Amino acid sequence: MVEAGWSRQVKRFAWLMAAALCALPQFYINAYASSGEARRYLSRYEVIPPTASRVVVCHGFGCKFKTVVGLNGGDIQTLRRILAKGARSAQAEVSAVADAVSWFERRIGAITGTNRRTPRAGPDQSGLRSEADCIDESVNTTALLILISDLRLLRHHEVDGPASRGYLVDFRYPHATAVIRDVQTGALWAIDPWTKSNGQRPDTLPLERWMRGS
């Protein structure tokens, strides 16, 4: 029992160290990134940019596993229909983006095995194919955002580089999120599905508020 408990503590510490190292480089880009940074973020995890016919999906924590998910004309039409609801205003587009992420999570979940992933997955789920940490989720959400941007479905926002918070030294767990930027006001929005069950609407809130979270 003592040995098993010690093993869990070692695993938790190793996970925290890895998560902190993953999050730290993002500290410098969370407020001033561009769509170029979003693409470089994918490259960092050796994820090729999405196309209208396929997207690479990360899972298993830190992109340990990568699954190529094929997309078809019906998928693209679904995205067009969802994002059309956001055409009237920037706020409506944030809501439409959240709907698109929710749809995308359901679309990929059955293929990657993450359809029952654990919300706020931590060290106990690390390394499991059926789970996803915030790095996986920020990569996958950023890939989707790049896709809908490339399809010219965003009118009021552009894709920004992911942001991170928490570096252990401030007594918060490291955490990352995908980000979009209002093209008129420059306002940044966090799009964060990691806190929710697969397919639920992600957290969508101003990045300033997200950065204050824990």
Image (cartoon, grey):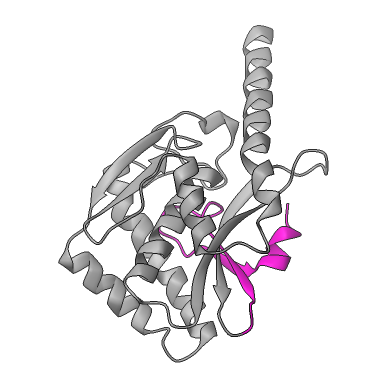
From the viewer's side, name the closer residue of 134 and 198. Answer: 134
Q: Residue furthest left?
A: 73
- Based on the picture, tell me whether residue 103 belongs to the magenta stretch: no
Image spot of residue 1 (x, y percent): 64, 9
Q: Give the residue displayed 67% in from the left and 32% down from the top.
A: 16
Q: Give the residue displayed 46% in from the left and 54% down from the top.
A: 39
- Based on the picture, tell me whether residue 201 belongs to the magenta stretch: yes
From the viewer's side, name the closer residue of 7 and 152. Answer: 152
What span is in magenta? 185-214
The quarter of the picture where residue 83 lies is bottom left
**Number of marks drawn:** 0
Position of residue 114 relative to residue 138, above or below, is above
Image spot of residue 25 (x, y percent): 66, 44
Image spot of residue 201 (x, y percent): 47, 65
Image spot of residue 53 (x, y percent): 21, 57
Q: Residue furthest bottom?
A: 88
Q: Residue furthest front?
A: 36
From the viewer's side, name the closer residue of 122 and 81. Answer: 81
Position of residue 93 relative to residue 137, above or below, is below
Position of residue 74 relative to residue 184, above or below, is above
175 to the left or right of 61: right
The quarter of the picture where residue 200 lies is bottom left
Q: Give the residue displayed 36% in from the left and 47% down from the top.
A: 48
